[in-house]
Amino acid sequence: MDAITRRTFIAGSAAGLVAGLPTFGNASPELQEPTAAKPAGDKVGWAILGLGGYAMGQILPNLKACERSRLVAVISGDRDKAKRVAGQYGLDQAKGVYTYDEMDRIKDNPEIQVVYVITPPGNHREFTERAAKAGKHVCCEKPMAPSVADCQAMIDACKKAGVLLQIGYRSHYEANNLRAMEACRKELGQIRSVTSDHGFNIGRGLWRTQKKWSGGGSMMDIGIYAVQALRYLSGEEPTEVYATWTNPPNDDRFKEVEDTVSFTLKFPSGAVGTGTSGYSWSRGVNRYMALGTNGRVDAEPATSYGGNTLRINYRPAEVTPNNQFAAQMDHLSECIQDKKVVRTPGEMGLQDIRIIQAIYDSCRTGRPVKL
Ligand code: NAD
Protein backbone atom coordinates (compact mmCIF):
# COMPACT_ATOMS: atom_id res chain seq x y z
CA MET A 1 0.00 0.00 0.00
CA ASP A 2 1.46 3.40 -0.85
CA ALA A 3 1.68 6.25 1.63
CA ILE A 4 -1.41 8.09 0.43
CA THR A 5 -3.52 4.97 0.38
CA ARG A 6 -2.33 3.95 3.81
CA ARG A 7 -2.93 7.40 5.28
CA THR A 8 -6.43 7.67 3.94
CA PHE A 9 -7.57 4.15 4.71
CA ILE A 10 -6.24 4.09 8.21
CA ALA A 11 -8.17 7.27 9.06
CA GLY A 12 -11.32 6.47 11.05
CA SER A 13 -13.31 8.69 8.72
CA ALA A 14 -13.26 7.95 5.01
CA ALA A 15 -13.68 11.61 4.08
CA GLY A 16 -10.27 11.92 2.46
CA LEU A 17 -10.78 9.23 -0.15
CA VAL A 18 -12.62 10.88 -2.98
CA ALA A 19 -9.91 12.42 -5.12
CA GLY A 20 -10.15 11.13 -8.67
CA LEU A 21 -13.46 9.39 -8.10
CA PRO A 22 -16.44 9.98 -10.38
CA THR A 23 -18.65 13.00 -10.18
CA PHE A 24 -22.41 12.58 -10.12
CA GLY A 25 -25.00 15.17 -11.05
CA ASN A 26 -23.78 18.69 -10.37
CA ALA A 27 -21.57 17.81 -7.48
CA SER A 28 -17.85 17.42 -7.91
CA PRO A 29 -16.20 15.79 -4.91
CA GLU A 30 -12.98 17.52 -3.97
CA LEU A 31 -9.99 16.31 -2.01
CA GLN A 32 -11.12 16.58 1.56
CA GLU A 33 -9.01 16.10 4.65
CA PRO A 34 -10.19 13.51 7.16
CA THR A 35 -12.76 14.69 9.67
CA ALA A 36 -11.17 16.19 12.79
CA ALA A 37 -12.66 15.56 16.24
CA LYS A 38 -14.75 18.48 17.58
CA PRO A 39 -15.78 19.31 21.14
CA ALA A 40 -19.45 18.39 21.82
CA GLY A 41 -20.63 22.01 21.64
CA ASP A 42 -19.15 22.39 18.16
CA LYS A 43 -20.84 19.30 16.79
CA VAL A 44 -23.67 19.68 14.26
CA GLY A 45 -27.08 18.91 15.76
CA TRP A 46 -29.05 16.12 14.07
CA ALA A 47 -32.75 15.27 14.38
CA ILE A 48 -33.70 11.73 13.42
CA LEU A 49 -37.10 11.55 11.67
CA GLY A 50 -38.71 8.09 11.65
CA LEU A 51 -37.83 5.65 14.41
CA GLY A 52 -38.06 2.35 12.50
CA GLY A 53 -35.65 -0.49 12.01
CA TYR A 54 -32.79 1.35 10.32
CA ALA A 55 -32.93 4.41 12.56
CA MET A 56 -33.10 2.37 15.77
CA GLY A 57 -30.69 -0.37 14.71
CA GLN A 58 -27.97 1.57 12.90
CA ILE A 59 -28.27 5.34 12.86
CA LEU A 60 -29.05 6.24 16.47
CA PRO A 61 -26.42 3.90 17.96
CA ASN A 62 -23.76 5.03 15.49
CA LEU A 63 -24.38 8.74 16.05
CA LYS A 64 -22.48 8.21 19.29
CA ALA A 65 -19.38 7.36 17.26
CA CYS A 66 -19.56 10.61 15.27
CA GLU A 67 -16.86 13.21 15.65
CA ARG A 68 -18.78 16.14 14.17
CA SER A 69 -22.43 15.14 14.64
CA ARG A 70 -24.62 14.75 17.71
CA LEU A 71 -28.21 13.75 18.33
CA VAL A 72 -30.40 16.66 19.49
CA ALA A 73 -33.97 15.55 18.64
CA VAL A 74 -36.21 12.75 17.43
CA ILE A 75 -39.29 13.19 15.22
CA SER A 76 -41.83 10.38 15.07
CA GLY A 77 -45.49 9.62 14.36
CA ASP A 78 -45.66 8.04 17.81
CA ARG A 79 -45.11 10.51 20.67
CA ASP A 80 -44.67 7.82 23.33
CA LYS A 81 -42.01 6.07 21.30
CA ALA A 82 -40.26 9.40 20.63
CA LYS A 83 -40.24 10.18 24.35
CA ARG A 84 -38.92 6.74 25.17
CA VAL A 85 -36.11 6.98 22.61
CA ALA A 86 -35.31 10.54 23.70
CA GLY A 87 -34.97 9.24 27.26
CA GLN A 88 -32.77 6.38 26.14
CA TYR A 89 -30.41 8.82 24.38
CA GLY A 90 -30.44 11.48 27.10
CA LEU A 91 -32.29 14.14 25.11
CA ASP A 92 -34.11 17.10 26.58
CA GLN A 93 -37.81 15.99 26.59
CA ALA A 94 -38.98 19.58 26.02
CA LYS A 95 -36.68 20.48 23.10
CA GLY A 96 -35.82 17.06 21.71
CA VAL A 97 -39.20 15.43 20.97
CA TYR A 98 -41.50 16.23 18.04
CA THR A 99 -44.33 14.39 16.31
CA TYR A 100 -44.70 14.62 12.53
CA ASP A 101 -47.62 17.04 13.07
CA GLU A 102 -45.43 19.30 15.16
CA MET A 103 -42.28 19.13 13.09
CA ASP A 104 -42.66 22.54 11.46
CA ARG A 105 -41.83 23.98 14.89
CA ILE A 106 -38.24 22.79 14.49
CA LYS A 107 -37.58 26.10 12.75
CA ASP A 108 -37.56 27.65 16.23
CA ASN A 109 -34.96 25.21 17.55
CA PRO A 110 -31.48 26.37 16.49
CA GLU A 111 -29.89 23.23 17.98
CA ILE A 112 -31.36 21.23 15.09
CA GLN A 113 -29.23 21.80 12.00
CA VAL A 114 -29.92 18.57 10.08
CA VAL A 115 -33.03 16.41 9.71
CA TYR A 116 -32.29 12.79 8.77
CA VAL A 117 -35.38 11.38 6.98
CA ILE A 118 -35.62 7.60 7.59
CA THR A 119 -39.21 6.75 6.62
CA PRO A 120 -40.62 4.89 3.61
CA PRO A 121 -39.78 6.59 0.28
CA GLY A 122 -43.43 7.58 -0.26
CA ASN A 123 -43.07 10.42 2.24
CA HIS A 124 -39.39 11.37 1.74
CA ARG A 125 -40.46 14.31 -0.41
CA GLU A 126 -42.93 15.70 2.10
CA PHE A 127 -40.51 15.46 5.03
CA THR A 128 -37.57 16.82 3.02
CA GLU A 129 -39.61 19.81 1.86
CA ARG A 130 -40.83 20.52 5.39
CA ALA A 131 -37.33 20.26 6.86
CA ALA A 132 -35.90 22.55 4.17
CA LYS A 133 -38.70 25.06 4.73
CA ALA A 134 -37.76 25.09 8.40
CA GLY A 135 -34.21 26.03 7.32
CA LYS A 136 -32.64 22.65 8.14
CA HIS A 137 -30.12 20.69 6.09
CA VAL A 138 -31.42 17.28 5.04
CA CYS A 139 -30.04 13.78 4.89
CA CYS A 140 -32.59 11.52 3.18
CA GLU A 141 -32.47 7.74 3.02
CA LYS A 142 -32.38 5.81 -0.24
CA PRO A 143 -34.28 5.41 -2.52
CA MET A 144 -34.63 9.18 -2.70
CA ALA A 145 -38.33 9.14 -3.75
CA PRO A 146 -40.73 7.18 -5.97
CA SER A 147 -40.44 9.46 -9.02
CA VAL A 148 -37.95 11.71 -10.80
CA ALA A 149 -40.39 14.61 -10.33
CA ASP A 150 -40.39 14.05 -6.54
CA CYS A 151 -36.58 13.97 -6.51
CA GLN A 152 -36.37 17.18 -8.52
CA ALA A 153 -38.83 18.88 -6.17
CA MET A 154 -36.66 17.85 -3.18
CA ILE A 155 -33.53 19.25 -4.84
CA ASP A 156 -35.37 22.48 -5.69
CA ALA A 157 -36.77 22.86 -2.16
CA CYS A 158 -33.30 22.50 -0.61
CA LYS A 159 -31.74 24.91 -3.13
CA LYS A 160 -34.49 27.46 -2.49
CA ALA A 161 -33.96 27.20 1.26
CA GLY A 162 -30.17 27.35 0.91
CA VAL A 163 -29.67 24.02 2.71
CA LEU A 164 -27.62 20.93 1.79
CA LEU A 165 -29.18 17.65 0.70
CA GLN A 166 -27.38 14.34 1.18
CA ILE A 167 -28.71 10.90 0.19
CA GLY A 168 -27.84 8.11 2.64
CA TYR A 169 -25.64 6.11 0.27
CA ARG A 170 -23.44 4.67 3.00
CA SER A 171 -21.25 2.66 0.58
CA HIS A 172 -19.65 5.93 -0.52
CA TYR A 173 -18.33 6.31 3.02
CA GLU A 174 -17.30 2.69 3.63
CA ALA A 175 -13.60 1.87 3.40
CA ASN A 176 -13.83 -1.32 1.26
CA ASN A 177 -16.10 0.31 -1.29
CA LEU A 178 -13.87 3.38 -1.46
CA ARG A 179 -10.84 1.15 -2.01
CA ALA A 180 -12.73 -0.71 -4.77
CA MET A 181 -13.53 2.62 -6.48
CA GLU A 182 -9.90 3.65 -6.23
CA ALA A 183 -8.72 0.33 -7.71
CA CYS A 184 -11.19 0.70 -10.59
CA ARG A 185 -9.93 4.21 -11.33
CA LYS A 186 -6.21 3.59 -10.94
CA GLU A 187 -5.30 -0.09 -11.17
CA LEU A 188 -7.70 -2.02 -13.40
CA GLY A 189 -6.96 -0.35 -16.75
CA GLN A 190 -10.03 0.04 -18.96
CA ILE A 191 -13.12 -1.29 -17.19
CA ARG A 192 -14.94 -3.69 -19.56
CA SER A 193 -17.55 -5.29 -17.35
CA VAL A 194 -19.14 -4.68 -13.98
CA THR A 195 -21.70 -7.00 -12.43
CA SER A 196 -23.62 -6.73 -9.18
CA ASP A 197 -26.35 -8.77 -7.48
CA HIS A 198 -28.41 -7.58 -4.54
CA GLY A 199 -31.44 -9.25 -3.01
CA PHE A 200 -33.05 -10.96 -0.06
CA ASN A 201 -36.30 -12.63 1.00
CA ILE A 202 -38.95 -9.99 1.79
CA GLY A 203 -41.58 -10.52 4.49
CA ARG A 204 -45.33 -10.05 4.13
CA GLY A 205 -47.53 -7.06 4.83
CA LEU A 206 -44.72 -4.49 4.75
CA TRP A 207 -44.67 -0.98 3.23
CA ARG A 208 -41.89 -2.33 0.99
CA THR A 209 -44.47 -4.29 -1.02
CA GLN A 210 -46.99 -1.41 -1.16
CA LYS A 211 -46.25 0.72 -4.22
CA LYS A 212 -47.60 3.93 -2.71
CA TRP A 213 -44.96 3.86 0.03
CA SER A 214 -42.11 2.01 -1.69
CA GLY A 215 -42.34 3.38 -5.22
CA GLY A 216 -41.50 -0.14 -6.49
CA GLY A 217 -40.18 -3.51 -5.43
CA SER A 218 -36.72 -5.01 -5.14
CA MET A 219 -35.15 -2.56 -7.60
CA MET A 220 -36.06 0.48 -5.52
CA ASP A 221 -35.11 -1.02 -2.18
CA ILE A 222 -32.10 -3.26 -2.75
CA GLY A 223 -31.39 -3.29 -6.50
CA ILE A 224 -30.47 0.36 -6.12
CA TYR A 225 -27.23 -0.85 -4.49
CA ALA A 226 -26.43 -2.76 -7.67
CA VAL A 227 -27.19 0.29 -9.83
CA GLN A 228 -24.98 2.35 -7.54
CA ALA A 229 -22.14 -0.21 -7.73
CA LEU A 230 -22.28 -0.27 -11.52
CA ARG A 231 -22.06 3.53 -11.53
CA TYR A 232 -19.33 3.97 -8.95
CA LEU A 233 -17.15 1.08 -10.12
CA SER A 234 -17.38 1.98 -13.83
CA GLY A 235 -17.15 5.71 -13.05
CA GLU A 236 -19.59 6.31 -15.90
CA GLU A 237 -23.24 7.12 -16.47
CA PRO A 238 -25.30 4.67 -18.56
CA THR A 239 -26.69 5.73 -21.91
CA GLU A 240 -29.02 2.74 -22.44
CA VAL A 241 -30.82 0.18 -20.30
CA TYR A 242 -32.30 -3.22 -21.09
CA ALA A 243 -34.14 -5.26 -18.46
CA THR A 244 -36.50 -8.15 -17.78
CA TRP A 245 -38.39 -9.13 -14.65
CA THR A 246 -40.05 -12.12 -13.00
CA ASN A 247 -43.12 -11.65 -10.84
CA PRO A 248 -44.47 -14.89 -9.31
CA PRO A 249 -48.25 -14.77 -9.97
CA ASN A 250 -49.42 -16.54 -6.83
CA ASP A 251 -47.36 -14.69 -4.28
CA ASP A 252 -49.27 -11.87 -2.59
CA ARG A 253 -46.02 -9.97 -1.93
CA PHE A 254 -45.80 -9.21 -5.64
CA LYS A 255 -49.29 -7.90 -6.40
CA GLU A 256 -48.10 -4.29 -6.51
CA VAL A 257 -44.33 -4.45 -6.86
CA GLU A 258 -41.76 -6.49 -8.76
CA ASP A 259 -39.71 -9.41 -7.48
CA THR A 260 -36.61 -10.32 -9.51
CA VAL A 261 -35.11 -8.01 -12.13
CA SER A 262 -32.19 -8.63 -14.46
CA PHE A 263 -30.76 -5.53 -16.12
CA THR A 264 -27.99 -4.40 -18.44
CA LEU A 265 -26.54 -0.90 -18.55
CA LYS A 266 -24.50 0.34 -21.53
CA PHE A 267 -21.78 2.85 -20.71
CA PRO A 268 -20.22 5.38 -23.12
CA SER A 269 -16.76 3.73 -23.04
CA GLY A 270 -18.28 0.44 -24.19
CA ALA A 271 -18.16 -1.06 -20.70
CA VAL A 272 -21.17 -3.21 -19.91
CA GLY A 273 -22.91 -3.29 -16.54
CA THR A 274 -25.15 -6.19 -15.58
CA GLY A 275 -27.16 -6.53 -12.41
CA THR A 276 -29.84 -8.50 -10.66
CA SER A 277 -32.16 -7.60 -7.85
CA GLY A 278 -34.61 -9.80 -5.98
CA TYR A 279 -37.12 -10.05 -3.17
CA SER A 280 -37.62 -13.84 -3.10
CA TRP A 281 -34.09 -15.19 -2.73
CA SER A 282 -33.67 -17.69 0.06
CA ARG A 283 -30.66 -15.85 1.52
CA GLY A 284 -29.52 -12.25 1.28
CA VAL A 285 -26.93 -11.55 -1.42
CA ASN A 286 -24.83 -8.43 -1.96
CA ARG A 287 -21.84 -8.67 -4.24
CA TYR A 288 -20.02 -7.18 -7.21
CA MET A 289 -17.19 -7.82 -9.64
CA ALA A 290 -15.41 -5.37 -11.93
CA LEU A 291 -13.22 -6.64 -14.77
CA GLY A 292 -10.69 -4.39 -16.44
CA THR A 293 -7.91 -4.79 -19.01
CA ASN A 294 -5.34 -4.90 -16.17
CA GLY A 295 -7.15 -6.62 -13.32
CA ARG A 296 -10.31 -7.20 -11.35
CA VAL A 297 -12.03 -6.50 -8.06
CA ASP A 298 -14.43 -8.88 -6.31
CA ALA A 299 -16.50 -8.19 -3.23
CA GLU A 300 -18.91 -10.42 -1.32
CA PRO A 301 -20.38 -9.28 0.97
CA ALA A 302 -19.92 -5.92 -0.69
CA THR A 303 -22.48 -3.60 0.90
CA SER A 304 -23.39 -5.10 4.27
CA TYR A 305 -23.59 -3.12 7.50
CA GLY A 306 -20.34 -4.79 8.59
CA GLY A 307 -17.91 -7.51 7.52
CA ASN A 308 -17.53 -6.44 3.91
CA THR A 309 -14.65 -8.04 2.07
CA LEU A 310 -12.72 -6.99 -1.01
CA ARG A 311 -10.26 -8.79 -3.24
CA ILE A 312 -8.12 -7.00 -5.80
CA ASN A 313 -6.58 -9.32 -8.37
CA TYR A 314 -7.56 -12.31 -6.21
CA ARG A 315 -5.74 -11.01 -3.12
CA PRO A 316 -7.51 -9.66 -0.03
CA ALA A 317 -7.27 -5.86 -0.11
CA GLU A 318 -5.53 -4.13 2.82
CA VAL A 319 -8.38 -2.08 4.18
CA THR A 320 -8.95 -0.97 7.75
CA PRO A 321 -12.70 -1.24 8.43
CA ASN A 322 -14.39 2.03 9.35
CA ASN A 323 -17.78 3.06 10.72
CA GLN A 324 -19.64 3.87 7.50
CA PHE A 325 -22.71 5.25 9.29
CA ALA A 326 -20.68 7.72 11.36
CA ALA A 327 -18.54 8.60 8.34
CA GLN A 328 -21.66 9.33 6.28
CA MET A 329 -23.18 11.60 8.95
CA ASP A 330 -19.88 13.29 9.75
CA HIS A 331 -19.38 14.03 6.07
CA LEU A 332 -22.57 16.10 5.90
CA SER A 333 -21.66 17.84 9.16
CA GLU A 334 -18.25 18.61 7.72
CA CYS A 335 -19.83 20.00 4.54
CA ILE A 336 -22.03 22.27 6.69
CA GLN A 337 -19.21 23.44 8.94
CA ASP A 338 -16.49 23.79 6.32
CA LYS A 339 -18.64 24.64 3.28
CA LYS A 340 -17.67 21.56 1.30
CA VAL A 341 -19.47 19.75 -1.53
CA VAL A 342 -21.71 16.81 -0.55
CA ARG A 343 -20.35 13.57 -1.97
CA THR A 344 -23.75 11.87 -2.34
CA PRO A 345 -26.09 14.75 -3.25
CA GLY A 346 -29.72 14.80 -4.35
CA GLU A 347 -28.62 14.75 -7.98
CA MET A 348 -27.06 11.32 -7.40
CA GLY A 349 -30.30 10.05 -5.87
CA LEU A 350 -32.33 11.45 -8.76
CA GLN A 351 -30.07 9.78 -11.34
CA ASP A 352 -30.64 6.38 -9.71
CA ILE A 353 -34.40 6.89 -9.86
CA ARG A 354 -34.12 7.92 -13.53
CA ILE A 355 -32.17 4.70 -14.25
CA ILE A 356 -34.61 2.52 -12.26
CA GLN A 357 -37.58 4.07 -14.06
CA ALA A 358 -35.87 3.26 -17.39
CA ILE A 359 -35.33 -0.32 -16.15
CA TYR A 360 -39.07 -0.55 -15.37
CA ASP A 361 -39.94 0.86 -18.83
CA SER A 362 -37.71 -1.74 -20.47
CA CYS A 363 -39.29 -4.55 -18.41
CA ARG A 364 -42.76 -3.40 -19.46
CA THR A 365 -42.01 -2.91 -23.17
CA GLY A 366 -39.40 -5.61 -23.73
CA ARG A 367 -37.21 -3.00 -25.47
CA PRO A 368 -33.98 -1.16 -24.68
CA VAL A 369 -34.55 2.32 -23.28
CA LYS A 370 -32.20 5.24 -23.97
CA LEU A 371 -31.25 7.54 -21.13
P1 NAD B 1 -39.15 0.53 8.93
O1 NAD B 1 -40.44 0.02 8.41
O2 NAD B 1 -38.38 -0.31 9.88
O3 NAD B 1 -39.34 1.96 9.59
C1 NAD B 1 -40.03 2.98 8.93
C2 NAD B 1 -40.31 4.10 9.90
O4 NAD B 1 -41.06 5.10 9.21
C3 NAD B 1 -41.17 3.67 11.10
O5 NAD B 1 -40.74 4.36 12.23
C4 NAD B 1 -42.58 4.09 10.71
O6 NAD B 1 -43.38 4.38 11.83
C5 NAD B 1 -42.28 5.36 9.92
N1 NAD B 1 -43.31 5.69 8.91
C6 NAD B 1 -43.66 6.94 8.57
N2 NAD B 1 -44.60 6.92 7.61
C7 NAD B 1 -44.85 5.64 7.36
C8 NAD B 1 -45.72 4.98 6.46
N3 NAD B 1 -46.52 5.66 5.66
N4 NAD B 1 -45.72 3.63 6.43
C9 NAD B 1 -44.89 2.92 7.24
N5 NAD B 1 -44.03 3.51 8.10
C10 NAD B 1 -44.03 4.84 8.18
O7 NAD B 1 -38.25 0.86 7.64
P2 NAD B 1 -36.68 1.02 7.58
O8 NAD B 1 -36.07 -0.29 7.19
O9 NAD B 1 -36.18 1.71 8.76
O10 NAD B 1 -36.54 1.94 6.26
C11 NAD B 1 -36.74 3.34 6.34
C12 NAD B 1 -35.92 4.01 5.22
O11 NAD B 1 -34.56 3.69 5.41
C13 NAD B 1 -36.26 3.52 3.81
O12 NAD B 1 -36.09 4.57 2.89
C14 NAD B 1 -35.23 2.44 3.56
O13 NAD B 1 -34.96 2.22 2.20
C15 NAD B 1 -34.03 3.04 4.25
N6 NAD B 1 -33.06 2.03 4.70
C16 NAD B 1 -31.78 2.24 4.39
C17 NAD B 1 -30.83 1.33 4.77
C18 NAD B 1 -29.39 1.57 4.43
O14 NAD B 1 -28.59 0.66 4.64
N7 NAD B 1 -29.02 2.75 3.96
C19 NAD B 1 -31.21 0.19 5.47
C20 NAD B 1 -32.55 0.01 5.80
C21 NAD B 1 -33.47 0.95 5.39
Image (cartoon, grey):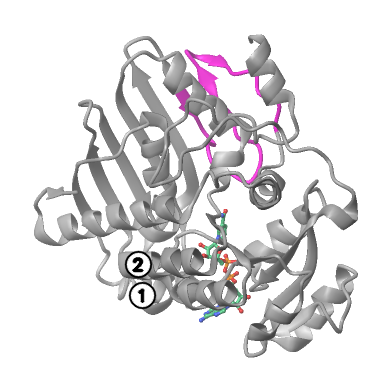
Amino acid identity at mark 1: Lys
Secondary structure under badge 2?
loop
- Residue 262 against residue 257 in the figure, above or below: above
How packed mark 1 is, by other alpha carbons closer than 10 Å (few <14, some 14-19, many 20 or more), is: some
Q: Is residue 3 magenta?
A: no
Q: From the viewer's side, name the closer residue of 294 and 218.
A: 294
Does 145 sit left or right of 284 as displayed? left
Q: Is residue 353 left or right of residue 164?
A: left
Asked whether disc 2 touches disc 1, contact meaning CB atoms under 8 Å apart, the reply is yes
The N terminus sits in image quarter: top right
**Nearer to the camera, 340 or 25:** 340
Label 1: element kind: helix
Instruction: In the rendered view, tell whether residue 242 sits above or below residue 153.
Output: above
- The residue sitting at 64% across, 73% down in the picture is 50
Disc 2 or 1, which lies upstream in sequence? 1
Q: Which portion, as a residue range, is magenta?
A: 297-321
Please identify the dominant SS of the magenta region: loop
Q: Dividing the image into four equal quarters, which quarter contains ligand 1?
A: bottom right
Q: Which residue is mark 1?
A: 211
Mark 2 = which residue?
216
- Give x and y (percent) for residue 150: 37, 70
Q: Is mark 2 within 8 Å of ligand 1?
A: no
Determine the residue positioned at 74% across, 69% down. 112
Q: Quadrant of residue 245?
A: bottom left
Compared to 199, does 2 lie above or below?
Answer: above
Q: Quadrant of residue 321?
A: top right
Position of residue 5 measured from the top left corner of the image (x, y, whole percent):
63, 17
